[in-house]
Image (cartoon, rainbow, N blue to C red):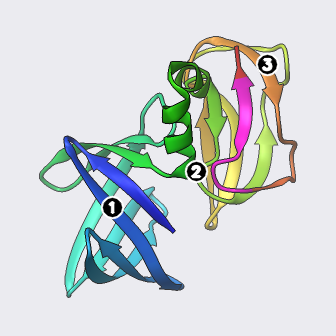
Amino acid sequence: MSLEIKINDRTTTVKLISQNGNLLEIEVDGKIYRVDLLHTPDGTFSIIESGKSYNIELVPKNQPKKYTAHTLYHTYDVEIVDAEARYLINRGSNGAASLEKTILSPMPGKVVKVLLKEGDVVQKGETVVIIAAMKMESEYKSPADGVIKKVNVKEGDTIEGNQVLVEIE
């Protein structure tokens, strides 16, 4: 699996070479790294590489695959550009506009609760779906004010990464 990560004004290519539990071998711009990556219960990521420990908090922005990353000393704007994002970018602004009013799952998991149904009015930031993944429950909030156009999942469903959960109009 290969993707691009934009960090502020820099774009880097990241490729997953192998994974054994939390131990990953990745290639970043042609250089190989062996890292121990753990998504902690408080929502941060703990990374150990060459005996050095790093903690990163990723805070989702209003658009899918865009985050603010906080480290001990710095804050960065981060965007994940994978195959789906490249496709939407190539489709032009219509694809981007429709993506801004969807709730996507960033990773595989299980739907614990769907709080709203089609036709319900939703406010930006309101929790719409709760997903369990990696032994944690995460709330997925509306990226915009609107009306729930379509709910593509129900409680108990197993979901894939980047699956559209809810569409808002």
The image shows residue 33 at horizontal and vertical percentages of 29, 82
Residue in view at x 65 percent, y 55 percent:
161
Q: Work out how far the residue at label 1 is from the one at label 3, CA to CA, in angstroms.
A: 35 Å
In the rendered structure, are the residues bearing label 1 and label 3 in contact, judged by CB atoms less than 8 Å apart?
A: no
Q: Name the residue under label 1.
A: 13
N-term mark: 1 or 3: 1
Extreme residue toward the left, this view: 73
How far across and down, in percent of the image, does residue 64 sit? 51, 37
The mark nearer the N terminus, 2 or 3, is: 2
Query: Is residue 80 depicted above or below 51 in this figure?
Result: above
Q: What element carries label 1?
A: strand
Instruction: State the residue in front, 169 or 95.
Output: 95
**Residue type of the residue flagged with mark 1:** Thr
Residue 82: say if magenta.
no
Measured from the top left, where is residue 95 in percent x and y?
58, 26
Question: Vertically, is 38 above or below 102?
Answer: below
Residue assigned mark 2: 106
The residue nearer to you, when weighing 112 against 17, is 17
Looking at the image, which is closer to me, 166 or 82?
A: 82
